[in-house]
Image (cartoon, helix red, strand yellow):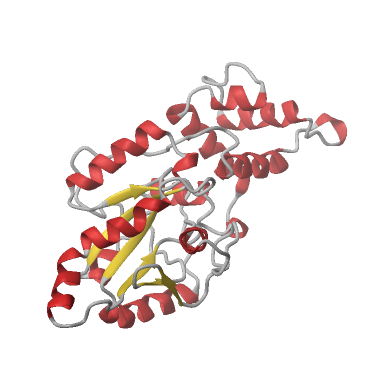
């Protein structure tokens, strides 16, 4: 299932980021804690250049906590400061500004030596569509300022926000890369709602999700939908079984698999199937190798 989605505003976003990066001190890269590897934009390293960068594992409340800890260890081993955030309950947000000051300590000291005490630290928040940047900013601010919705492509222009302690944060539109070569990466992005559902075959996507869940989260389907022994059945047969379990039947007793596909995707994305991480840290893979 080949997946690519690159609306015109994303190309514009990339051009604007190339221009804005010159006035930025620190890049904050938001990743989806459920798919940390697939949610890394391979173009970001080139855009960020030599700028300091921190990684935020967002939506950690929907990810397997043990896997999240493994991902934190992995990114730290690659030299990235990293924190995990509970986007639902606000856990971990108190670590963000202290981490920023820690990473930028040398620059802050140089500013003070030059008589520029209190000069703002300017941060660019980057991430793929629907990774939760606007919700992240609203949590950091403690108020609703950035537009946030659970669908890709909502933020269409940059926005500046003033944080405590002389920190300024730029929210940028979500950005993918022009061509997603790796099929697994495309599926992971589609599972989590990064790709617009309108361009996808949802029943086929749901079957791929069923296969992935049976491998990465055994028992999750059985627990949520009260079905039994899905392991050895073809994925479409399982989708039909889930539809019957939910009572999604049409005239003549046929299963409404399209409706079930939408429900399965929605319930995975909202965390109703449990705290599930779909990717484990690579053992020794070059950065951005999924491009």
Residue 160 location, x and y as percent?
44, 77
What residue is drawn where x is 53% and y is 70%? Answer: 155
Q: In this figure, what is the number of numbered marks?
A: 0
Residue 171 location, x and y as percent?
44, 70
Whether residue 43 appears in this view of the structure is: no
Q: Given the current orientation, which residue lies at the most extreme top position?
A: 229
Q: Nearer the viewer, residue 95 or 176?
A: 95
Residue 173 location, x and y as percent?
46, 70
Q: Is residue 41 above or below residue 219?
A: below
Q: Given the current orientation, which residue lies at the most extreme right position?
A: 251
113 on left or right of 104? left
2 on left or right of 52? right
Q: Is residue 42 above or below residue 118?
A: above
Q: Nearer the viewer, residue 252 or 216?
A: 216
Q: Nearer the viewer, residue 100 or 128?
A: 100
Q: Nearer the viewer, residue 283 or 52?
A: 52
Residue 29 location, x and y as percent?
34, 60
What residue is drawn where x is 24% and y is 47%? Answer: 75
Location of residue 40 by image quarter = bottom left
Whether residue 187 appears in this view of the structure is: yes
20 on left or right of 243? left
Which part of the image, by quadrant, shows the C terminus?
Answer: bottom left
Q: Is residue 190 above or below residue 7?
A: above
What residue is drawn where x is 29% and y is 36%? Answer: 70
9 on left or right of 35? right
Q: Is residue 127 above or below residue 24?
A: above
What residue is drawn where x is 43% and y is 79%? Answer: 12
């Amino acid at each position: 299932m080949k997946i690519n989605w690159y609306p015109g505003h994303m190309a514009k976003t990339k051009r604007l980021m190339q221009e804005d990066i010159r006035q930025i001190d620190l890049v904050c890269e938001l990743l989806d804690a459920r798919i940390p590897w697939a949610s890394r934009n391979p173009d970001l390293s080139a855009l960020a250049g030599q700028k300091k960068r921190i990684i935020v594992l967002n939506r950690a409340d929907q990810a397997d906590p043990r896997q999240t800890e493994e991902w934190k260890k992995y990114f730290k081993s690659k030299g990235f400061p990293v924190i995990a955030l509970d986007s639902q309950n606000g856990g971990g947000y108190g670590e963000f500004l202290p981490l920023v000051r820690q990473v930028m300590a040398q620059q802050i000291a140089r500013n003070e030596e030059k008589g520029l005490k209190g000069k703002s630290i300017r941060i660019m928040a980057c991430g793929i569509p629907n990774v939760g940047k606007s919700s992240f900013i609203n949590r950091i601010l403690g108020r609703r300022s950035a537009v946030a919705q659970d669908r890709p492509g909502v933020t269409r222009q940059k926005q500046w926000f003033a944080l405590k302690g002389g920190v300024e944060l730029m929210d940028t539109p979500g950005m993918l890369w022009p061509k997603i070569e790796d099929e697994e990466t495309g599926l992971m992005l589609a599972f989590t709602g990064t790709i617009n559902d309108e361009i996808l075959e949802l029943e086929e996507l749901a079957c791929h999700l069923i296969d992935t869940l049976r491998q990465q989260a055994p028992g999750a389907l059985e627990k949520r939908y009260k079905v039994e022994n899905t392991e050895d059945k073809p994925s479409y047969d399982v989708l039909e079984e889930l539809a019957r379990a939910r009572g999604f039947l049409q005239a003549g007793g046929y299963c409404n698999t399209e409706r079930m596909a939408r429900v399965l995707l929605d319930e995975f994305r909202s965390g109703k199937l449990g705290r599930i991480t779909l990717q484990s840290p690579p053992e020794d893979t070059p950065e951005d190798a999924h491009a």
